[in-house]
Amino acid sequence: MKKPFLLAIILFAFNSVNAQNGPDANPYQKNNEIKLNLISPLSGAVEAGFERYLSKNSSLGISVFKVYDNTREKDLNYYISPYYRYYLGKKYASGFFVEGFGMFTSIDGKKIYAADNLTFTEGKDVYDLALGAGLGWKLVTKKGLVFEANTAYGRLVFNADKTDHNQVLKLGLSIGYRF
């Protein structure tokens, strides 16, 4: 009587442990990611990002962009951009995604040209908020290496009239690590 009862308890214990994992659970699931944009140095800047996964299909993240060479990037100084992403792929937080973002940005003021039309002075820096949307694609290896390509477009909300443009564009070809 004791042996069948003990066997039933052991089988129940193994079954309950397996049920907690579920058929779709990934024991190697990692919820954080850091990444570096590889094309931002072409414009004289550096961009790094952090992303936290909320579920299989959604995440919150933030990216920081800072210009170090003003001869290449003439208008933008820096931005801090939080975003929300929704993943449409079958694997955990990978594949095609859509995103909505906000962006706190520092942009050079309007250029005011002199009468000779050759020299100009620049207005003071303008701080503004931009809102926009984007899309992209992400590939994640089993070791946690991440490759991402994305593009996003947004519009300045408050001070667009104080700058030479009223829109922002985010382009990324990033490499990162999921942990």
Image (cartoon, grey):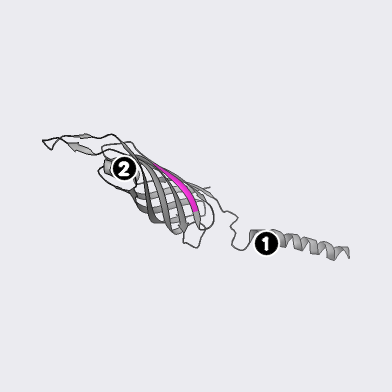
Which one is nearer the viewer's eye here, 103 or 9? 103
Q: Which residue is mark 2?
A: 159
Query: Residue 42: x and y, percent?
Result: 31, 44
Residue lying at 54% horizontally and 53% vertically, measured from the top left: 54
Query: Residue 177: x and y, percent?
Result: 48, 47
Query: Residue 130: x and y, percent?
Result: 36, 47
Which one is nearer the viewer's eye here, 35 or 165? 165
Q: Residue type at mark 2: give it.
A: Asn
If the image is split into quadrants, where does the N terminus sit?
bottom right
Mark 2 is surrounded, within 10 Å at the Cα level, by few (under 14), some (14 to 19) or many (20 or more) other residues, namely some
| Numbered mark located on residue 19 in the image | 1
Q: Which residues are magenta?
A: 59-64
Q: Residue type at mark 1: give it.
A: Ala
Circle 1 SS class: helix
Which one is nearer the viewer's eye here, 100 or 50? 100
Give the Cα distance between marks 2 and 1: 54 Å
Q: Residue furthest right?
A: 1
Circle 2 SS class: loop
Q: Is residue 93 above or below residue 51?
A: below
